[in-house]
Amino acid sequence: MRPLDLDYMLGLLPVLLKYVPLTLAMASVAMVLALALASLMAIVRVLRVPGLDQLTKVFISFFRGTPLLVQLFLFYYGLPQIFSFLTAIDGVTAAVMGLTLHFAAYMAESIRAAIIGVDRSQWEASLSVGMTTAQMMRRIILPQAARIAAPTLVNYFVDIIKSTSLAFTLGVTELMGAAQKEAAGSFLYFEAFIMVAIIYWVIVELLTMVQRQLEVRLGKAHAR
């Protein structure tokens, strides 16, 4: 049993940290896009918009029922064979698209549940004062649903960050891709992957702290 090469691990740390901004940028863009798409789908599901409701159900079923890695391969390797204009899409874009659609399917159900969780009297009161459905959703229902769904959405952001590690399968040199290259060059696979695991762990723990603070603040606001 060989000892850990601590010098190699310490030297590897600044190399890997250079790729953290790309990892966080991919996750942040995917989160924003997924949140927007999920909110639209949740509203469609709640209001049961004819036609769109059925399409949304199929979308959610497909992206929740197939592995993320398969979806990433479809976007990067499969679709360009059918639609030639998609050959211009690079690995980062394909990864963000895959993460967006995959997590939007999950987030849509969470947001839908949060919207339904708003007391029915709020709906009735909004309509009774002459608000349209759009005004009611924008001014009354969605702000309350956001408070309910916020902790769950932070968890999804954590999952998105961890899932960016699959982007290296599309040739993207992000945090996991950089660790893979460094390990292949040094043959010190354990040291390289334990370092990348620690970095992900620290990021997730920091976000968990943010989530706890968010829950406390939302709880205090609701108590008022």
Image: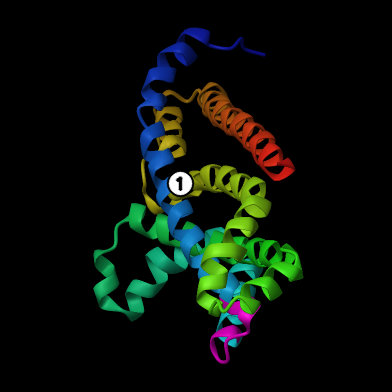
Taking the image as shown, residue 80 lies to the left or right of residue 209, namely left
Q: How is the image coloured?
A: rainbow
Considering only vertical position in the picture, is 173 above or below 113? above
Q: Residue at x 45, y 31 (%)?
A: 179
Considering only vertical position in the picture, is 173 above or below 12? below
Q: Quadrant of the N terminus?
A: top right
x and y, in percent, of residue 191 in the image: 54, 21
Specify whether residue 31 is in view: yes
Which quadrant holds residue 114? bottom right
x and y, in percent, of residue 169 in the image: 45, 51
Considering only vertical position in the picture, is 86 above or below 159? below
Considering only vertical position in the picture, is 72 above or below 136? above
* Local secondary structure at mark 1: helix
From which residue to which does the magenta span run? Answer: 44-53
Taking the image as shown, residue 64 lies to the left or right of residue 79, namely right
Q: Is residue 42 magenta?
A: no
Q: Residue at x 68, y 72 (%)?
A: 125
x and y, in percent, of residue 30 in the image: 44, 54
Specify whether residue 168 is in view: no
Q: Residue at x 66, y 65 (%)?
A: 115
Q: Residue at x 42, y 40 (%)?
A: 23
Nearer to the camera, 166 or 20: 20
Q: Is residue 45 magenta?
A: yes
Nearer to the camera, 136 or 203: 136
Instruction: Answer few, some or many: residues within 10 Å of disc 1's Cα (few below 14, many 20 plus, some between 14 and 19).
Output: many
- The residue tagged 1 is 27
Task: Report the amino acid beneath label 1.
Answer: Ala
How many marks are shown on the rendered structure? 1
